Image (tube, rainbow, N blue to C red):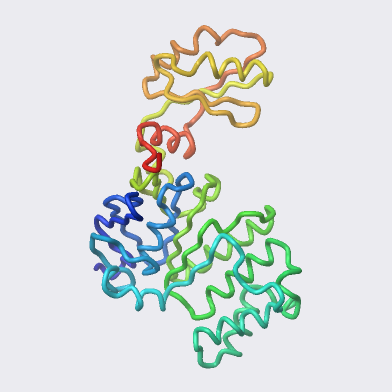
Protein backbone atom coordinates (compact mmCIF):
# COMPACT_ATOMS: atom_id res chain seq x y z
CA UNK A 1 0.00 0.00 0.00
CA UNK A 2 1.24 3.46 -0.89
CA UNK A 3 2.24 5.53 2.13
CA UNK A 4 -0.36 8.10 1.05
CA UNK A 5 -3.21 5.57 0.86
CA UNK A 6 -5.09 4.74 4.05
CA UNK A 7 -7.47 2.35 2.28
CA UNK A 8 -6.74 0.28 -0.81
CA UNK A 9 -9.24 -2.50 -1.59
CA UNK A 10 -10.06 -4.49 -4.71
CA UNK A 11 -13.24 -6.39 -5.67
CA UNK A 12 -14.85 -6.77 -2.25
CA UNK A 13 -18.10 -8.75 -2.12
CA UNK A 14 -20.71 -9.26 0.57
CA UNK A 15 -23.92 -11.28 0.59
CA UNK A 16 -26.62 -11.74 3.21
CA UNK A 17 -28.49 -14.93 2.44
CA UNK A 18 -29.31 -14.90 -1.27
CA UNK A 19 -28.90 -11.10 -1.58
CA UNK A 20 -25.61 -9.97 -3.11
CA UNK A 21 -25.42 -6.63 -1.31
CA UNK A 22 -21.97 -5.42 -2.47
CA UNK A 23 -20.49 -6.50 -5.81
CA UNK A 24 -16.80 -6.24 -6.76
CA UNK A 25 -16.25 -3.02 -4.81
CA UNK A 26 -12.85 -1.36 -5.33
CA UNK A 27 -11.70 1.91 -3.77
CA UNK A 28 -8.69 3.90 -2.66
CA UNK A 29 -8.82 6.54 0.10
CA UNK A 30 -5.93 8.86 0.92
CA UNK A 31 -4.84 10.01 4.34
CA UNK A 32 -6.69 13.17 5.41
CA UNK A 33 -9.39 12.71 2.75
CA UNK A 34 -13.13 13.17 3.27
CA UNK A 35 -14.85 10.55 1.14
CA UNK A 36 -18.61 10.78 0.65
CA UNK A 37 -20.73 7.70 -0.09
CA UNK A 38 -24.03 8.44 -1.81
CA UNK A 39 -26.84 6.10 -2.71
CA UNK A 40 -30.49 5.22 -2.06
CA UNK A 41 -31.59 3.23 0.98
CA UNK A 42 -30.51 -0.38 0.60
CA UNK A 43 -27.84 0.54 -1.93
CA UNK A 44 -25.01 -1.13 0.00
CA UNK A 45 -23.14 2.04 0.93
CA UNK A 46 -23.13 1.40 4.69
CA UNK A 47 -22.17 -2.26 4.14
CA UNK A 48 -19.31 -1.12 1.88
CA UNK A 49 -18.00 1.34 4.47
CA UNK A 50 -18.21 -1.24 7.27
CA UNK A 51 -16.14 -3.67 5.22
CA UNK A 52 -13.50 -0.99 4.64
CA UNK A 53 -13.29 -0.29 8.37
CA UNK A 54 -13.07 -3.83 9.70
CA UNK A 55 -16.57 -3.74 11.13
CA UNK A 56 -17.76 -6.38 8.66
CA UNK A 57 -15.69 -9.11 7.01
CA UNK A 58 -15.98 -9.34 3.19
CA UNK A 59 -16.91 -12.69 1.63
CA UNK A 60 -14.21 -12.22 -1.02
CA UNK A 61 -11.80 -9.66 -2.44
CA UNK A 62 -8.64 -8.29 -0.93
CA UNK A 63 -6.98 -5.11 0.25
CA UNK A 64 -5.85 -3.17 3.27
CA UNK A 65 -7.01 -0.46 5.65
CA UNK A 66 -4.61 1.35 7.97
CA UNK A 67 -1.97 -1.14 6.86
CA UNK A 68 -4.04 -4.15 7.98
CA UNK A 69 -5.64 -6.84 5.82
CA UNK A 70 -9.41 -6.30 5.49
CA UNK A 71 -10.08 -10.05 5.57
CA UNK A 72 -7.72 -11.36 8.24
CA UNK A 73 -6.98 -8.38 10.50
CA UNK A 74 -10.37 -6.77 11.09
CA UNK A 75 -9.86 -6.63 14.88
CA UNK A 76 -6.72 -4.50 14.44
CA UNK A 77 -8.55 -2.15 12.07
CA UNK A 78 -11.46 -1.65 14.47
CA UNK A 79 -9.13 -0.44 17.23
CA UNK A 80 -8.16 2.56 15.09
CA UNK A 81 -11.62 3.47 13.75
CA UNK A 82 -14.18 5.88 15.21
CA UNK A 83 -17.79 5.03 14.27
CA UNK A 84 -20.67 7.51 14.55
CA UNK A 85 -24.06 5.90 13.88
CA UNK A 86 -27.10 7.62 12.39
CA UNK A 87 -29.16 7.05 15.52
CA UNK A 88 -27.86 8.64 18.75
CA UNK A 89 -26.48 5.63 20.64
CA UNK A 90 -25.16 7.06 23.90
CA UNK A 91 -26.93 7.03 27.26
CA UNK A 92 -29.59 9.71 27.64
CA UNK A 93 -29.75 9.45 31.43
CA UNK A 94 -26.02 10.21 31.77
CA UNK A 95 -24.43 13.63 31.47
CA UNK A 96 -22.01 14.55 28.68
CA UNK A 97 -19.03 13.99 30.98
CA UNK A 98 -20.41 10.70 32.31
CA UNK A 99 -21.08 9.41 28.79
CA UNK A 100 -17.55 10.18 27.64
CA UNK A 101 -16.05 8.68 30.80
CA UNK A 102 -18.06 5.49 30.25
CA UNK A 103 -16.87 5.22 26.63
CA UNK A 104 -13.28 5.78 27.75
CA UNK A 105 -13.66 2.96 30.29
CA UNK A 106 -14.94 0.63 27.54
CA UNK A 107 -11.82 1.40 25.49
CA UNK A 108 -9.69 0.71 28.57
CA UNK A 109 -7.98 4.05 28.03
CA UNK A 110 -5.08 5.09 30.19
CA UNK A 111 -5.38 8.66 31.41
CA UNK A 112 -9.06 8.62 30.57
CA UNK A 113 -9.92 11.67 32.70
CA UNK A 114 -7.48 13.78 30.71
CA UNK A 115 -8.82 12.33 27.45
CA UNK A 116 -12.42 13.14 28.45
CA UNK A 117 -11.52 16.69 29.50
CA UNK A 118 -9.64 17.19 26.23
CA UNK A 119 -12.56 15.92 24.14
CA UNK A 120 -14.99 18.19 26.00
CA UNK A 121 -12.73 21.18 25.37
CA UNK A 122 -12.02 20.41 21.70
CA UNK A 123 -15.69 19.89 20.81
CA UNK A 124 -16.91 22.96 22.74
CA UNK A 125 -18.92 20.95 25.26
CA UNK A 126 -17.57 22.59 28.42
CA UNK A 127 -20.63 24.70 29.21
CA UNK A 128 -22.85 21.63 29.07
CA UNK A 129 -20.59 18.95 30.53
CA UNK A 130 -23.03 18.16 33.37
CA UNK A 131 -26.20 18.29 31.26
CA UNK A 132 -28.02 15.00 30.64
CA UNK A 133 -27.62 13.75 27.08
CA UNK A 134 -31.39 13.23 26.81
CA UNK A 135 -31.91 16.97 27.29
CA UNK A 136 -29.62 17.98 24.41
CA UNK A 137 -30.79 19.26 21.03
CA UNK A 138 -29.94 17.32 17.88
CA UNK A 139 -26.89 19.47 17.19
CA UNK A 140 -25.45 19.03 20.69
CA UNK A 141 -26.13 15.28 20.62
CA UNK A 142 -24.25 15.15 17.33
CA UNK A 143 -21.31 17.00 18.88
CA UNK A 144 -21.29 14.61 21.88
CA UNK A 145 -21.37 11.58 19.56
CA UNK A 146 -18.42 12.97 17.61
CA UNK A 147 -16.49 13.56 20.84
CA UNK A 148 -17.11 9.94 21.86
CA UNK A 149 -15.83 8.75 18.45
CA UNK A 150 -12.63 10.75 18.82
CA UNK A 151 -11.76 9.78 22.41
CA UNK A 152 -9.30 7.05 21.41
CA UNK A 153 -7.70 9.23 18.68
CA UNK A 154 -8.70 7.10 15.67
CA UNK A 155 -6.95 7.42 12.32
CA UNK A 156 -10.17 6.75 10.42
CA UNK A 157 -13.64 8.13 11.15
CA UNK A 158 -16.84 6.53 9.87
CA UNK A 159 -19.95 8.71 9.86
CA UNK A 160 -23.22 6.97 8.94
CA UNK A 161 -25.85 9.57 7.95
CA UNK A 162 -24.46 11.91 10.63
CA UNK A 163 -26.52 15.08 10.12
CA UNK A 164 -30.13 13.86 10.24
CA UNK A 165 -32.28 16.13 12.38
CA UNK A 166 -29.83 19.00 12.96
CA UNK A 167 -30.37 22.68 12.20
CA UNK A 168 -28.38 24.57 9.52
CA UNK A 169 -26.01 26.24 11.99
CA UNK A 170 -25.23 22.92 13.71
CA UNK A 171 -24.70 21.39 10.28
CA UNK A 172 -22.20 24.09 9.34
CA UNK A 173 -20.36 23.76 12.66
CA UNK A 174 -20.23 19.99 12.24
CA UNK A 175 -18.65 20.18 8.78
CA UNK A 176 -16.12 22.74 9.95
CA UNK A 177 -15.04 20.26 12.63
CA UNK A 178 -14.85 17.41 10.10
CA UNK A 179 -12.62 19.47 7.80
CA UNK A 180 -10.40 20.38 10.75
CA UNK A 181 -10.03 16.68 11.59
CA UNK A 182 -9.17 15.88 7.98
CA UNK A 183 -6.57 18.65 7.95
CA UNK A 184 -4.94 16.97 10.96
CA UNK A 185 -4.51 13.76 8.91
CA UNK A 186 -7.65 11.81 9.87
CA UNK A 187 -9.50 10.18 6.97
CA UNK A 188 -13.30 10.43 7.05
CA UNK A 189 -15.88 8.21 5.34
CA UNK A 190 -19.35 9.78 5.23
CA UNK A 191 -22.55 8.01 4.22
CA UNK A 192 -25.17 10.56 3.13
CA UNK A 193 -28.29 11.14 1.03
CA UNK A 194 -27.72 14.88 0.71
CA UNK A 195 -26.08 16.42 -2.34
CA UNK A 196 -25.16 19.64 -0.51
CA UNK A 197 -23.13 17.50 1.89
CA UNK A 198 -21.57 15.66 -1.03
CA UNK A 199 -20.19 18.96 -2.27
CA UNK A 200 -18.31 19.36 1.02
CA UNK A 201 -16.38 16.11 0.47
CA UNK A 202 -13.01 15.81 -1.22
CA UNK A 203 -14.07 12.75 -3.19
CA UNK A 204 -17.33 10.87 -3.82
CA UNK A 205 -18.51 7.33 -4.48
CA UNK A 206 -21.96 6.82 -5.99
CA UNK A 207 -23.33 3.40 -5.05
CA UNK A 208 -26.59 1.77 -6.16
CA UNK A 209 -27.75 -1.72 -5.24
CA UNK A 210 -24.30 -3.04 -4.53
CA UNK A 211 -22.56 -1.51 -7.54
CA UNK A 212 -20.08 1.36 -7.56
CA UNK A 213 -21.44 3.65 -10.30
CA UNK A 214 -18.88 6.43 -10.20
CA UNK A 215 -16.08 7.85 -8.09
CA UNK A 216 -13.95 10.99 -8.13
CA UNK A 217 -13.92 14.59 -6.94
CA UNK A 218 -17.25 16.43 -7.16
CA UNK A 219 -15.94 18.21 -10.27
CA UNK A 220 -14.81 14.94 -11.86
CA UNK A 221 -18.16 13.28 -11.15
CA UNK A 222 -19.99 16.17 -12.81
CA UNK A 223 -18.04 15.53 -16.01
CA UNK A 224 -18.32 11.74 -16.05
CA UNK A 225 -21.52 11.97 -18.07
CA UNK A 226 -22.16 14.69 -20.61
CA UNK A 227 -25.54 16.04 -19.54
CA UNK A 228 -27.46 19.01 -20.88
CA UNK A 229 -29.97 20.55 -18.49
CA UNK A 230 -32.77 23.08 -18.89
CA UNK A 231 -34.56 24.55 -15.87
CA UNK A 232 -38.18 25.60 -16.25
CA UNK A 233 -40.26 27.44 -13.65
CA UNK A 234 -43.95 28.31 -13.57
CA UNK A 235 -47.22 27.55 -11.78
CA UNK A 236 -47.17 24.26 -9.90
CA UNK A 237 -50.14 22.75 -11.74
CA UNK A 238 -48.61 23.57 -15.13
CA UNK A 239 -45.23 22.14 -14.13
CA UNK A 240 -46.87 18.90 -12.99
CA UNK A 241 -48.58 18.52 -16.37
CA UNK A 242 -45.41 19.52 -18.21
CA UNK A 243 -43.36 16.86 -16.38
CA UNK A 244 -45.84 14.21 -17.51
CA UNK A 245 -45.70 15.51 -21.10
CA UNK A 246 -41.90 15.52 -21.23
CA UNK A 247 -41.18 12.13 -19.67
CA UNK A 248 -40.54 9.55 -22.34
CA UNK A 249 -39.97 12.05 -25.15
CA UNK A 250 -36.99 11.38 -27.37
CA UNK A 251 -34.01 13.34 -26.07
CA UNK A 252 -35.28 13.60 -22.47
CA UNK A 253 -33.37 11.37 -20.05
CA UNK A 254 -35.18 12.50 -16.91
CA UNK A 255 -37.35 15.26 -15.45
CA UNK A 256 -36.78 16.17 -11.81
CA UNK A 257 -38.65 18.62 -9.59
CA UNK A 258 -36.67 21.10 -7.47
CA UNK A 259 -39.19 23.22 -5.58
CA UNK A 260 -41.03 25.38 -8.15
CA UNK A 261 -38.61 24.38 -10.91
CA UNK A 262 -38.15 21.34 -13.13
CA UNK A 263 -34.76 20.15 -14.37
CA UNK A 264 -35.12 18.58 -17.83
CA UNK A 265 -31.98 16.64 -18.71
CA UNK A 266 -30.65 14.76 -21.73
CA UNK A 267 -27.37 13.60 -23.23
CA UNK A 268 -28.02 14.82 -26.78
CA UNK A 269 -28.28 18.61 -26.74
CA UNK A 270 -30.07 18.93 -30.10
CA UNK A 271 -32.57 16.16 -29.30
CA UNK A 272 -33.29 17.72 -25.90
CA UNK A 273 -33.97 21.12 -27.46
CA UNK A 274 -36.34 19.54 -29.99
CA UNK A 275 -38.19 17.84 -27.13
CA UNK A 276 -38.78 21.06 -25.21
CA UNK A 277 -39.41 23.27 -28.29
CA UNK A 278 -43.23 22.84 -28.27
CA UNK A 279 -43.34 24.34 -24.77
CA UNK A 280 -40.61 26.97 -25.08
CA UNK A 281 -42.87 29.93 -25.87
CA UNK A 282 -45.59 29.39 -23.28
CA UNK A 283 -46.06 32.66 -21.41
CA UNK A 284 -46.39 31.08 -17.97
CA UNK A 285 -43.17 29.08 -18.31
CA UNK A 286 -39.66 30.50 -17.90
CA UNK A 287 -36.81 28.44 -19.39
CA UNK A 288 -33.07 28.76 -18.75
CA UNK A 289 -30.01 26.67 -19.62
CA UNK A 290 -28.37 25.26 -16.48
CA UNK A 291 -25.23 23.36 -15.46
CA UNK A 292 -26.09 19.80 -14.46
CA UNK A 293 -25.61 19.21 -10.73
CA UNK A 294 -24.48 16.20 -8.71
CA UNK A 295 -28.08 15.11 -8.22
CA UNK A 296 -28.77 15.25 -11.98
CA UNK A 297 -25.72 13.05 -12.59
CA UNK A 298 -26.73 10.63 -9.84
CA UNK A 299 -30.29 10.27 -11.15
CA UNK A 300 -28.93 9.71 -14.65
CA UNK A 301 -26.52 7.03 -13.48
CA UNK A 302 -29.32 5.30 -11.57
CA UNK A 303 -31.46 4.89 -14.69
CA UNK A 304 -29.96 1.64 -15.84
CA UNK A 305 -29.31 0.02 -12.45
CA UNK A 306 -31.76 -2.59 -11.25
CA UNK A 307 -32.78 -2.99 -7.60
CA UNK A 308 -31.30 -6.29 -6.42
CA UNK A 309 -33.79 -6.47 -3.55
CA UNK A 310 -36.85 -6.77 -5.77
Q: Tell which residue pokes out farthest to the bottom in this image.
A: 111
Q: Is residue 82 left or right of residue 140?
A: left
Pinpoint residue 152: horizontal percent, then vertical percent. Answer: 49, 81
Q: Residue at left 61%, top 85%?
A: 101
Please say if 271 is above or below 142.
Answer: above
Q: Is 253 in front, or is 227?
A: 253
The picture places residue 282, in percent across and down from the top left corner, at: 61, 8
- Side of 192 where 241 appears, left or right: right
Residue at 50%, 88% in the rendered image: 108
Taking depth in this image into account, of 189 and 288 the one nearest to the observer is 189
Work out which quarter of the rendered image holds the C terminus and state it.
top left
In the image, is residue 249 above or below residue 63? above
- Quadrant where the N terminus sits is bottom left
- Give how far across and how far down residue 278 sits, in percent: 52, 7
Tell me the residue at 44%/52% (across/down): 37
Residue 134 percent across, percent down from the top left: 72, 69
- Vertical placement of residue 257 versus 71, above or below: above
In the displayed orientation, state which residue is furthest to the front: 17
Q: Quadrant of residue 221?
A: top left
Relative horizontal placement of residue 84, taking residue 211 as reference (left or right): right
Amino acid sequence: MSAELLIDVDRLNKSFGHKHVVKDFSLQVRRGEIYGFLGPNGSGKTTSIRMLCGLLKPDSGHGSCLGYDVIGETAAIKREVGYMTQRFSLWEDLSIRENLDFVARMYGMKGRRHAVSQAIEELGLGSRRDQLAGELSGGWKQRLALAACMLHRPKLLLLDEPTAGVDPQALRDFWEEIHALAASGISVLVSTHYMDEAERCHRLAYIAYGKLLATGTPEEVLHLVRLNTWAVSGPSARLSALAADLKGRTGVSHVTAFGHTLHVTGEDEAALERAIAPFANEEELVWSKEQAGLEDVFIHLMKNVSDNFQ
